[in-house]
Image (spheres, rainbow, N blue to C red):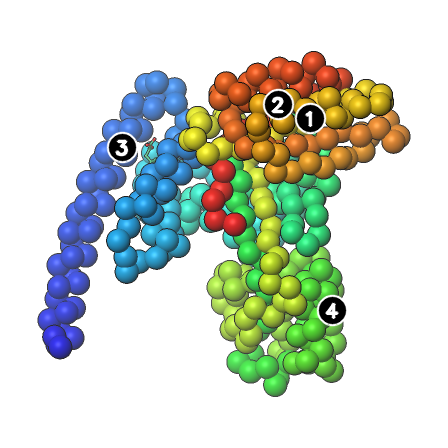
Amino acid sequence: MRELEELRKEIDELDKKLLDILNRRAQIVLQIRDWKIKNNYPTFDPSREKELLDRLVKENKGPLDKDAVIGIFKTIISYLRSLEKEIEVLYLGPEGSFTHQAAVKFFGEGSKFKPLLLVEDIFKSLEEGAEYAVVPIENSLEGTVGSTMDLLAITTKKVIGEVYLDVKHSLISFEDSIDKIRKVYSHPQALAQCKKWLRQNLPNVEEIPTSSTSFAAKLVKEERGSAAIASNFAANIFGLNILAENIQDFWNNKTRFLVLGREIPKPTGKDKTSIIFSVKHQAGALYRALRPLHDFGLNMTLIQSRPVPAKPFEYRFFVDFQGHIEDEKVSCALEKIKEECIDFKVLGSYPEANDF
Ligand SMILES: O=C(O)C(=O)C[C@]1(C(=O)O)C=C[C@@H](O)C=C1
């Protein structure tokens, strides 16, 4: 076996080469910046980033795994992207929330993030000029997020991406041992999702509901003898200890988030399209509106009705399906769908996330 000193020397040499390569990559990114300014092209190109990451995952020979390759390159791309222009991403806060985690997963650590406490405020800021935002849209246990859908119906911005996140809960605290915990703070949904674990491991603690899991994390930083149910991501942000991991009763708990921006990304060959429409109150109207998806062989991944405000018991429909508006099959299907609708809007076409 080789000695530590010798191995570290080799790492030092490789790091030097890596740094040199990264700076060469940065030089090219700066040239791309100049090209983009001249050609009025957006800095952030989610289709290109997806294509690049997918290719690297395919070419990877290990021992790094897929998540490591994606994580490392997302971070590199996001820091270099900020040399072109620093983009600001709004997310549903507070800091340390699952939406914050989803935003970092999509844009990479080198981006700038800003929390807002209401989905309404996020959409308002987008209309006032903010460029990007991440909002929750559906959870595998709780269903769709109505407030997000209602605001999507009226926004002028586009859906440019999607992110899936495993909702994994941890018990996190300033304390270093579970024996010292007398109070547990968290969002009522998280407390409910960890009921079995709490009953078995902390049967006599007081459970205190909070407005979010990340707010709970913030609170327990200041209070001895307390813990929060929140993510490891929140524990990192607030510098707390992780006393127990994966304490949720259900394993398959995932949340899907949408990324909003100004321009619909180019097709990647594996995309999704989101539309919203309403139909006449007539027998078969919804069937006729959806039939073109079947006729053109397009796979629907979500359908959800939402009440139309000010029109009691009238509904509009949110539909996601696989394909991009620039695909011929999709544009033909959309023309047919439109013919059957009172209102119709394309919310966006975007690279499909392939990690859920
Ligand atoms: O190819 C581009 O358009 C770039 O700006 C470069 C780059 C990258 O670092 O690879 C950075 C930002 C874009 O979102 C996509 C890719």
Between marks 1 and 4 in the image, the one whose residue lies nearer the viewer:
1
- List x then y, in percent, for residue 204: 74, 82
Q: Looking at the image, which residue sits at the far bottom? A: 179
The numbered mark, 3 or 1, whose residue comes first in the sequence reads 3
Give me the residue at 69% from left, 36% from top.
303
Residue type, numbered disc 1: Leu
Determine crowd level at label 2: few under 14, some 14-19, many 20+ residues with C-alpha closer than 10 A: few
Q: Earlier in the sequence, mark 2 or mark 3?
A: 3
Kind of residue indicated by mark 2: Asp
Amino acid type for the residue under numbered disc 3: Leu
Instruction: Name the residue located 60 percent from the left edge and 63 percent from the top edge.
Output: 251
2 lies left or right of 258? left
Q: Are marks 1 and 2 in contact (CB under 8 Å)?
A: no
Whole-angstrom CA distance, mark 4 to mark 2, is 52 Å
Label 4 secondary element: strand
Left-right relation of 49 to 28: right
Location of mark 3 (residue)? 30
Callouts 1 and 4 close, C-beta under 8 Å: no
- Which is in the foreground here, disc 1 or disc 2? 2
Per the image, the residue denoted by label 4 is 208
The residue under label 1 is 290
> How far from the left and from the top, in percent, is residue 349?
53, 29
Which residue is painted at 37% across and 36% down in the image? 51
